Image (cartoon, rainbow, N blue to C red):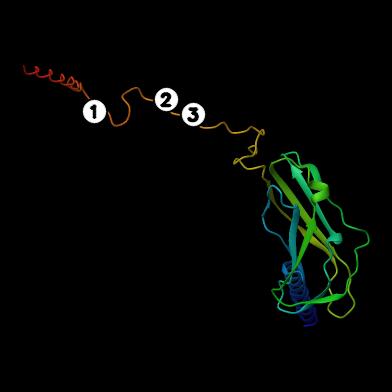
Amino acid sequence: MGVSGRGRAAAVAAVLALAAACGGAGEERRGEAAEPAVRLWASPIVRWEPGARRAVGFALENPTNRTVHVASPDPANARVDVYAGADGLRVCGAAPVEPPAPGPPVALAPGDRLSVRVDLEAACGGVPPGEYRFEVGYRAAAPAGADAFSGTLAARHGQVLVSGPGTSGEAVSRGGVEPSPPEREPARRGRAPGARGGRGRRAPAPAAAPAPAPEGR
């Protein structure tokens, strides 16, 4: 009876340990799948048109169902890198300040976005026309207040399409070649407009003037 009691106790302990292990694993999985309080949103395609100021815009987004407070967004806290080619050659970009620039707390309601625009005219104004890749990241400073968010947000990626000058009165985007004027159609041989086809009749000769009548005697 004593041995059987010890066996039952061991079995109960094993079941409790297994339940605790499964519960801990489930909590860990739920923690990993939980949405971050704030995340970045960026358009997958950015277009830089001729004559327009070059910049990359993104937003801080609240994907949760509760209001979150963040420091007022500052472009100085953003990192933007523009790459060319398959080798990932960095051609231009902007680096964030260290430490992150603080700002007053701003309430971010569920589903709301705070827009940020990073000016890259000085850094990327000389990038030639073509297709590039961009990566944008952001580090939020810690604002004062309860339920406040701070930290580095996961980066977002996209494509930058840089256009060259237009073709109307300017050089085309590739090669800077001026478009040649359209060739004129060669003039057709033929009679002047209004002339009748085929052989025309000859104009009648002018009638001879009548002879003067003889003078009477």
Considering only order in the chain, which callout, 1 or 3, is on the residue closer to the N terminus? Answer: 3
Amino acid at the residue labelled 2? Pro
Amino acid at the residue labelled 1? Arg
Residue under label 1: 196
Considering only order in the chain, which callout, 1 or 2, is on the residue closer to the N terminus? Answer: 2
Q: What's the distance in space between the residues labelled 2 and 1, CA to CA?
A: 22 Å
Amino acid at the residue labelled 3? Glu
> Is residue 176 or residue 139 the one in the foreground?
176
- Quarter of the picture holding the N terminus: bottom right
Q: Which mark is residue 186?
A: 2
Q: What's the distance in space between the residues labelled 3 and 1, CA to CA?
A: 30 Å
Badge 3 marks a residue whose secondary structure is loop
Residue under label 3: 183
Q: Looking at this view, name the residue that lies furthest to the front.
A: 217
Q: Which mark is residue 89?
A: none
Return the x and y of residue 25 as percentages of the image width and height.
Answer: 75, 69
Return the x and y of residue 190 as percentages of the image width and height.
Answer: 32, 23
Return the x and y of residue 114 as percentages of the image width and height.
Answer: 75, 69
When the figure is inspected, residue 75 is found, relative to residue 90, above or below; the finding is below
From the image, state whether disc 2 or disc 1 is nearer to you: 1
Say few, some or many: other residues with alpha carbon within 10 Å of mark 2 (under 14 / 14 to 19 / 20 or more). Answer: few
Badge 1 marks a residue whose secondary structure is loop
- Quarter of the picture holding the C terminus: top left
Q: What residue sits 74% from the left and 65% below the top? A: 59
When the figure is inspected, residue 139 is found, relative to residue 64, above or below; the finding is above
In the picture, measured across the screen, residue 199 lies left or right of residue 93, that is left
